[in-house]
């Protein structure tokens, strides 16, 4: 499945994220009106990391998303395919084992992690099916996947307003705060093209995950999907 890639090759997407690395966290905070911090707290609750557990945080970017897992005493591996993001993360959190990796060919052995999680990154993987299978492969039996991703608002009138914000308001705001505003035009388009909640759940099941469920956040702007490896 490649619809979220919007015809960009993996190296082009990686380069795009390299260029926005320095201001990435700030830009996300502004564009989401601060909601990204709320969403990440919900991810941390869903992951429920505990001391001694191994957590893979895929598409971790600068590793900001990995810090809540590390704070619990879990061993967290932030992994991303953008070297620019990883370099920025290393400046801020040099003690974390930041790892370069492609979601469709993860550099880990089978059955390693208690939890695998990815927030706002699955859209940017060229082959969604392959990524979900790889996440399954590196998860221990009995382990879980937690995916936080933009989705489709459930109330039709709000969905219309939200789409207008993405395509009209987001690019000008990005130009004001981002080092590479064109990247956020791409991101807006990728959000609009992304599968809705039931469709993503079906992809998880197809990849082998069981007990698949989701919970809407912010009226469905974001959805938190979960699954278990039997």
Image (spheres, rainbow, N blue to C red):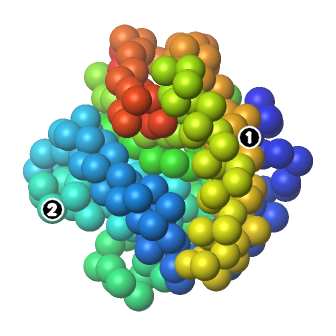
Q: Nearer the viewer, residue 76 or 4?
A: 4
Name the image quarter holding the N terminus.
top right
> Residue under circle 2?
71
> Residue under circle 1?
4
Name the spot of residue 164 as percent of width and height, x first.
66, 43
Could you say which quadrant of the image residue 4 lies in? top right
Name the spot of residue 214 as percent of width and height, x first.
39, 21
Residue sitting at x 36%, y 52%: 35
Residue sitting at x 23%, y 55%: 69
Q: Nearer the viewer, residue 6 or 89?
A: 6
In this rendering, would 22 be left or right of 104? Answer: left
Residue sitting at x 41%, y 65%: 29
Name the spot of residue 126 as percent of width and height, x first.
75, 44
Could you say which quadrant of the image residue 177 lies in? bottom right
In this rendering, would 44 be left or right of 14? Answer: left
Name the image quarter holding the C terminus.
top left
Disc 1 on helix, strand or loop?
helix
Q: CA distance from mark 2 to mark 1?
A: 32 Å
Q: Nearer the viewer, residue 50 or 137?
A: 50
- Dot placed on the residue nearer the N-terminal end, 2 or 1: 1
In this rendering, would 71 be left or right of 15? Answer: left
Residue 177 tag number: none
Q: Residues within 10 Å of mark 1 (few under 14, many from 20)?
A: many
Q: Residues within 10 Å of mark 2 (few under 14, many from 20)?
A: few
Residue sitting at x 19%, y 54%: 74
Q: Residue furthest bottom?
A: 91
Disc 2 on helix, strand or loop?
helix
Could you say which quadrant of the image residue 50 lies in? top left
Residue 141 visible to an observer of this rendering: no
Against 156, residue 146 (above or below) is below
């Amino acid at each position: 499945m490649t619809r979220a890639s919007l015809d960009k090759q993996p190296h082009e997407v990686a380069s795009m994220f390299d260029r926005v690395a320095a201001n990435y966290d700030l830009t996300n905070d502004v564009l989401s009106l601060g909601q990204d911090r709320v969403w990440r707290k919900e991810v941390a609750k869903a992951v429920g990391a505990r001391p001694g557990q191994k957590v893979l945080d895929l598409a971790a970017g600068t590793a900001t998303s990995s810090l809540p897992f590390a704070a619990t005493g879990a061993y967290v591996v932030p992994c991303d395919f953008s070297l620019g993001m990883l370099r920025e993360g290393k400046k801020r959190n040099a003690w974390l084992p930041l790892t370069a990796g492609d979601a469709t060919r993860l550099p880990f052995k089978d059955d390693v992690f208690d939890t695998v999680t990815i927030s706002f990154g699955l859209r940017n993987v060229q082959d969604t099916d392959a990524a979900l299978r790889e996440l399954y492969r590196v998860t221990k039996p009995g382990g879980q996947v937690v995916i936080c991703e933009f989705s489709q608002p459930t109330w039709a009138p709000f969905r219309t307003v939200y789409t207008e914000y993405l395509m009209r308001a987001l690019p000008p705001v990005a130009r004001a705060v981002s080092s590479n505003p064109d990247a956020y035009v791409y991101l807006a388009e990728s959000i609009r093209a992304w599968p809705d909640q039931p469709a993503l759940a079906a992809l998880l099941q197809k990849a082998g995950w069981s007990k698949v469920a989701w919970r809407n956040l912010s009226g469905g702007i974001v959805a938190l999907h979960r699954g278990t490896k039997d």
